Structures are given as C-alpha cells and as structure tokens.
Amino acid sequence: AATTGAAVVAAPTIIPSSVLGADGAVAPSNRVTIGIVGVGDHGTNVDLKGLLYQKDAQIVALCDVDLKNLERGKRMTLDSYANDTASGTYKGCFTTQDWRELIPRDDIDAVAVATPDHWHVLCSIAAMAAGKDCLCEKPLSLTVEEGRALSDAAAKYDRITITSSENRSKTNFLQACELVQNGRIGTLKHTRVELPGGWWARDMGYGLSQEPGPVPDHLDYAMWQGQVAHKPFSPGRFHFNWRWDMDYSGGFLTDWGAHMLDIAQWGNATDLTGPVSVAGTGKMDADGYYNVASEWALDYEYANGATLHCTNREPNKTTKGFASVRFEGTDGWIECDWGSIKASSEDILKTELGPDDIRLRTCRGGEHRDFLDCVKSREQTYAPFEVGHRTITISHIGNIAIQLGRKLRWDPETETFPDDAEANSMTSREMQNGWSLT
C-alpha cells in the first residue's frame, strides 16, 4: 500500500533590514560595544551623549559610584536604543557601582573612562590589560608617574587609545598648528597660553557646604575616594568641585591645561617630548579647603629654543574667550581662542598648503568618531595616551614649580628633575587603601 504525506514548507524568516545594516543602520556585527566608567556631569553630557550619537557604537554597560547618576545614564541609554530593543538588536545595559565588575565583561570591546582625575589611570590600565581599547578623559593623569605608567601600558597591551579632547578636531586649532609647523609665521619663538583662573564652585545638587556631612545613601563614598587617604564627605568638594583639591585633581592648570597646552605642543611639533625647564609663581593655599593654584604665571623653555608662557585670566564663564593660545614667530603671529582664529596679517590665514607641506592628523567628527574609526582600522588616534601624557606633564611640573617656588630643570627623556630629589618626590603619590599601579 502506498503511503502519502503532506509536504512541510517552512515559512521564510523575516530579518529586519536594520539587522542587515540597511536604512542607514549599522549591523550589530559592525558595532563597537562600549562600557563607560563614570557618568557624572561630563561623563553624561559629553561622553555618553557623544557615543550614543554614533550609529556604529552601542553602550552596553555603565558604572558610577552614585546611583542617581547611574539611573539617569541607564534611562538615557535605554531611551536612545528603544527601537533596537524592540527589534532585538539591543539586549540591555548592565550597571554597577564598581568598575571592576564592568571591565572584564566579554560583551565589551572598548571602555570610556570619565571619572574624577584620580581614578583615570587605574581604570584605564585595567581596561587595557583586559584587552579593551580605551578612551580616557583629560586630564589624563594626576601625577607624572601615573601618566607614564598609563602610556607604557597602552604600548604593552597594544591598545587603541585616545585622550578625550575635541581640540584637535576643531578647524581653527588645526589651521593654526599647520600654519605654524609649515613656517608661515617664520620660526616659532614663543607661545602664550591663557587658561581660566580661580575656582568655579558649582552646586551639583548637594550644596556647597565645606563642613563634613552624612554620606548620601545612594553613594559608595569609599569607592569614590579610592586611593586617597580618608576625608569626611563634604558637599563642597564632591561632584565637579573635586577639581579644586590636589588629592583629586590639579585645578584649572590641569583641567584646561589639558586642552590648550595640547595645542601649544601640537604647534611646536613637540607631541612626544616636552620642555627642559619650568619656573614661575602662583597663588596656592596648601592648607585651604580648596588648595589648587587659583593664579599662576609659568615660563617653560624647550630644547629647540622656543619658550612657552602659561598664565591665568579672569574667568568669564563663556565659551568664546574662555582660553586662548598665541604662537609668535619671527615673521608674525597667530592666535586662537575656543571659536576663532586671527593673525598679524590676513595673508597668513589665506595661505594655502601645498602637496609637500605638513598635514596634521585630525578627525573633523571629533574624539568619539576618531576613536571608533581607529578601533576598527587599528590605526592610532589623533591623541593617543603618549601624546596626552606629554601634554599634562607640562601642567604637573608647573604645579610642582609653584609649590617649590624655584626654577626647575626637566629632562623629558627620563621624565625627571636632574639632581633634584625634592622635586622628583612630587612626580608621584602614595596610594592608600590597598590600591597601587602594579
């Protein structure tokens, strides 16, 4: 007897075009998955927002010691990926108050570090040791020693890195540095950098009291302090205002020096070296509640004969005119602030570069775009950690000169003050609470 059976025809699987990368979307296999350590004011408004904007990035993990920051960051992330969640191409956002739980995750390709300055190096080294490429906010380090350890780790683990600053993507700074390096103002003789001065105490929702107070329930304060000797919780030196305490930062000399001194280095073609001396004065209250320099005038000398003067201006709390860099050469000058460029002659600015002229590495899309492109291409970014370390070292040795009140010789090769044990003792710090660089 014959047997009969009905043929089974499988229904076709419908794959959304977004999964395949159509309709302007990026296929999941081409996305760089990222964990962010630190989603406070800057970590949220610059790094989280900046990376969420990039279609080929996907934020899959967040860390912050403050649960309020963490909840805000997660909500922003989930809102941004609502369509991806509905299509099944986004699986959710892991959150934690301890960065050591985020960094080893297998679903993360790269880590962005946007903590207070005293945490930058330890988090970033751990990320690179775990095989992650790393974006770290400026200023890159708290001390010269930590910056050197960070840059060496990037080389050891062969990671793509970027010191997170947009300046090398800005048209006016790029134009200025290319013109200077190509001799359009003659031989560079002197650079003047002006930074905001003072302390900008900002109320971030906790008040500005300088008195000890109870630790908020939503805060892991011990983790926030990390390697710093215990200080009672005090609202006036917490979110944002840690910048004015030398245990956590270096004031505007490091906070904005990381921006503008970087452009001075770029124009002088000294990205991978530094000055050979520093001298100057500053106003610093070592025993004060805020103990960073609020005023300074620093003079640096370079082996190529160029000099650099870095000083503060009165803060006007606006973007334009906030800080500036001026290059002075034998045949003219060029000056830039945050949004403009001018020169001793309009002809200098109208100069076009030829095919044999120096062209500087940039990315017009900014630091997040550059980082993602380089994670994929495995080419280095416009400001890898060695460059960021060299820049912030200028600020660090300036702070040391202010504290010691005398001129210091500096060897940029060994990164030491020759025959000066007192000054050399200030290029590092003793970490507390079981933390160390090794």
Image (cartoon, rainbow, N blue to C red):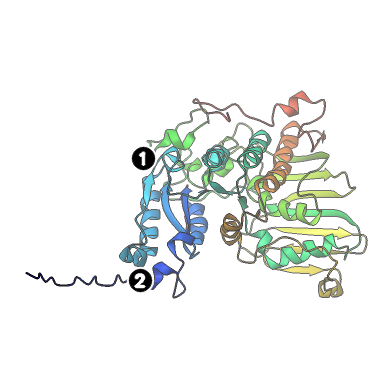
* Measured Cα–Cα span from mark 2 to mark 1: 45 Å
Secondary element at tag 1:
loop
The residue that mark 2 highlights is 16
Residue 220: which quarter of the image? top left
Three-letter amino acid code at disc 1? Pro
Kindly identify which numbered label has been placed on residue 216. Answer: 1
Front residue of this view, candidates 342 and 208:
342
Secondary element at tag 2:
loop
Earlier in the chain: of badge 2 and badge 1, it is 2
Given the current orientation, which residue lies at the most extreme left position?
Answer: 1
Which residue occupies 75% across, 58% down? 325
Confirm or deny contact between disc 2 and disc 1 (CB under 8 A): no
Determine whether 93 is above or below 229 in the image.
below
Determine whether 279 is above or below 11 in the image.
above
Residue 219: which quarter of the image? top left
**In the figure, is residue 223 to the left or right of 150?**
left
Residue 335: which quarter of the image? bottom right
**In the figure, is residue 268 to the left or right of 195?**
right
State whether residue 211 appears in this view: no
Front residue of this view, candidates 59 and 289:
59
